């Protein structure tokens, strides 16, 4: 066992740093939300997965034997997506999706599929495969406490870069983005095009940064008031100050995005998970409570107030159903579920099918439903969205379980970050489509893998007695 572990550590160091490089670069080319961008990263992910799995061929189940339940859930979802793009007999299409069968008959097609847009569903299937490979890479390569920290630091660095870039464009009064020449409006978008994807990405990176802070908080076992004050001061003024500054920069970028749900999802998730952690985490430090409170006092009421929090509040107050068309899009899209209930209309097919159901009250073109749960139900049916809910709930359960059961502070910090990411993403998915952006979806999948690692990874002992060494052999 020790030989295999040493082999894994030695021969997977290069793939691990390539994995981190991919994560850092993913959001830079327009959030990887263009075909040329996501295609490049998909090729890189597939190649890295093949290489890593080949290196781990001597280990049990290619290094993911501890995480079979999550892998199985993803395989079931992949099978559903595969069925959508597989030519099936007309009899089966009539049974599983009568509406798809009718559309293909009206078009005079010779080949029948469950998906009504085979081309888009094929693109969606390849994306899903690449995200599954990213999940496997997370489980395979994050095999030590040090690597968990490096992973969270990479996300923190990526989010800080995006926050600095997006904020400086606004503060310096730029009219065009530096690289791609897009028009810079009154809200920050970083290297993203869509401000809500940018806000959602910063929210995920903030989760990683907060997880790092929780990881580094000391266990407060000191009894005297003087020692407790010293512990609190060290938590706020030590080397963690750099991470804290990065968090403040990202909060500024998040607020300057003017994203209503992006901001709400972050602050609500940090509040809920912060309160839960005070209950679940045993032997917690006083610094944990101080940190959770400081996130509101420093970030929400002081830092954010100077960079547009009032504008976000104003947008929230002025939001009415009469001004918004998203609620009407949701109403118009619901009948699609009734027509394609079991397996959906096909991955990526929303923009193809929605115009047939769109009413005159909605004049704009919508390529997404502005509700990821609804869009997943439309495109993958009740069976697909059921698997999605199970994945989200299972990930949250694993995160909360690790927060309660694991004694190592690194696992507690990682699980804190995962719980925040799941709650924040779930909130944002109710009013927008963050999972349709490849960079956002990739980071979220990494958090899902991190939840499994925080539960299944065994702590390595640096020192051992001679007796223990003899017992190993």
Image: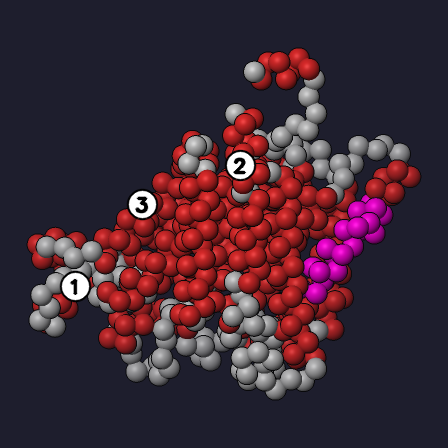
- Marks 1 and 3 close (CB-CB < 8 Å): no
Asked if the residues shown at circle 1 and circle 2 are in contact, with their CB atoms under 8 angstroms apart, the answer is: no
Residue 150 horizontal/vertical position (percent): 63, 48
Q: Is 448 on the left or on the right of 123, as rendered? A: right
Q: Nearer the viewer, mark 2 or mark 3?
A: 2
The question of residue 242 being in magenta is answered with: yes
Which numbered disc flags the more N-terminal residue, 2 or 3?
Answer: 2
Q: Residue at x 43, y 42 (%)?
A: 53
The residue tagged with tag 2: helix, strand or loop?
helix
Look at the image and give the residue range highlighted in magenta.
232-251
For disc 3, the neighbor class at 10 Å (few under 14, some 14 to 19, many from 20) is some
Which residue sits at x=27%, y=72%? 352
Q: Nearer the viewer, residue 272 or 340?
A: 340
Name the residue furthest bottom.
Answer: 175
Instruction: Tell me which numbered mark, 1 or 2, is placed earlier along the sequence.
Output: 2
Up-down relation of residue 301 to residue 289 (above or below): below
Main SS, magenta residues:
helix
Q: Earlier in the sequence, mark 1 or mark 3?
A: 3
Q: CA distance from mark 1 to mark 2?
A: 50 Å
Which image quarter: residue 75? top left
Q: Which mark is residue 76?
A: 3
Residue behind mark 1:
99
The residue that disc 2 covers is 8
């Amino acid at each position: 066992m020790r030989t295999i572990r040493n082999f894994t550590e030695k021969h997977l160091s290069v793939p691990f740093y390539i994995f981190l490089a991919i994560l850092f670069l993913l959001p830079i080319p327009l959030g990887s939300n263009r075909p040329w961008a996501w295609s490049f990263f998909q090729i890189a992910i597939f190649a890295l997965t093949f290489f890593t799995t080949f290196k781990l061929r001597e280990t049990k189940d290619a290094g993911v034997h501890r995480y079979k339940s999550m892998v199985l859930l993803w395989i079931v979802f992949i099978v559903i997506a595969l069925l959508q793009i597989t030519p099936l007999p007309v009899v089966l299409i009539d049974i599983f999706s009568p509406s798809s069968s009718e559309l293909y008959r009206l078009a005079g097609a010779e080949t029948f599929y469950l998906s009504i847009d085979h081309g888009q569903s094929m693109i969606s299937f390849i994306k899903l495969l690449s995200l599954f490979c990213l999940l496997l890479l997370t489980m395979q390569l994050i095999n030590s406490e040090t690597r968990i920290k490096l992973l969270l630091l990479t996300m923190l660095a990526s989010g800080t870069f995006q926050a600095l870039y997006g904020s400086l464009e606004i503060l310096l009064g730029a009219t065009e983005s530096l690289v791609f020449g897009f028009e810079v409006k009154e809200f920050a978008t970083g290297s993203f095009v869509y401000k809500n994807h940018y806000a959602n990405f910063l929210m995920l990176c903030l989760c990683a940064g907060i997880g790092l802070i929780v990881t580094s908080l000391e266990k407060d076992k000191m009894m005297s008031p003087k020692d407790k004050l010293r512990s609190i001061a060290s938590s706020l003024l030590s080397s963690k100050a750099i991470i804290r500054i990065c968090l403040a920069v990202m909060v500024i970028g998040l607020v300057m995005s003017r994203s209503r749900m992006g901001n709400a999802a972050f602050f609500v998730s940090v509040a809920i998970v912060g309160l839960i952690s005070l209950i679940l985490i045993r032997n917690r430090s006083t610094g944990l409570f101080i940190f959770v409170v400081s996130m509101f006092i420093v970030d929400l009421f002081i830092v954010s107030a100077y960079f547009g929090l009032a504008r976000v509040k104003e947008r929230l107050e002025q939001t009415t159903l009469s001004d918004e068309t998203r609620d009407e899009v949701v109403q118009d899209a619901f009948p699609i579920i009734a027509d394609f209930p079991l397996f959906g209309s096909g991955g990526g097919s929303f923009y193809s099918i929605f115009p047939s159901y769109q009413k005159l009250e909605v004049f704009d073109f919508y390529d997404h439903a502005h509700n990821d749960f609804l869009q997943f139900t439309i495109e993958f049916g009740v069976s697909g969205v059921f698997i999605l809910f199970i994945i989200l709930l299972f990930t949250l359960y694993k995160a909360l379980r690790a927060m309660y059961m694991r004694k190592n502070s690194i696992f507690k910090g990682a699980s804190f970050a995962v719980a925040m990411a799941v709650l924040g993403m779930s909130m944002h998915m109710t009013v927008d489509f963050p999972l349709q952006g490849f960079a956002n979806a990739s980071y979220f999948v990494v958090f899902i893998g991190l939840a499994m690692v925080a539960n299944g990874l065994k702590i390595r002992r640096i020192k051992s007695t001679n007796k223990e060494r003899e017992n190993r052999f």
